Amino acid sequence: MSSALDRLKNLTNKISSYEMARKENLKILKELYLELNLEKKVEEFSSLFEFKAINLSGASLVQKTLGEIKEGKYLQILAISYDKKAVVKSKNISLAYFGRVENVDIELKNRVIEFIIRYRFEKSFMTLEHYHDMLGDFKK
């Protein structure tokens, strides 16, 4: 009985920890949204999550090489929209352009990368909730 209770406590702690991390992430993500002037292209913060994804050009987002610049490229935040009714289903939209990546201030580049990672972190929670809700439909 004690081990079942311990497992339940551990699971509860983990869920609580994720929810706290998510709440803090959203707060910082909104600060970065304003700091990077993304409200010029996406007026409402919540509208960011209507995009299928947000990507980055000019620097690596791979964990092993995170932040490594790609010489000759431009640092740019790109949103991917998807319209299943359109002839061309997906479309890239530039949310922010910062110039040639080798000329961008390192701190700015790092803030841009942090924005992308924090966005993806929140988007993954939204995806998880979506599929959890869909699975609930099978219980009916």
Image: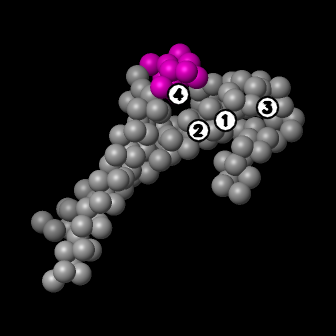
Q: How many marks?
A: 4
The residue wearing badge 3 is 101
Query: Magenta stretch: residue 38 in it?
Result: yes
Q: Main SS type for the magenta part? A: helix
Q: Which residue is drawn at 16% across and 68% down?
A: 139
Q: Which residue is drawn at 66% across and 48% down?
A: 61
* Contact? badges 4 and 2 (CB < 8 Å): yes
Above/below status of 136 relative to 16: below
Q: Which residue lies furthest to the top in this view?
A: 40
* Element type at mark 2: helix
Q: In this view, does 18 lie to the left or right of 62?
A: left
* Contact? badges 1 and 3 (CB < 8 Å): no
The residue wearing badge 2 is 114
Q: Which amino acid does label 1 sit on?
A: Asn
The residue wearing badge 4 is 32
Observer able to see residue 29: yes
Q: Distance between the Cα atoms at labels 3 and 2?
A: 16 Å
Q: Distance between the Cα atoms at labels 1 and 3?
A: 11 Å
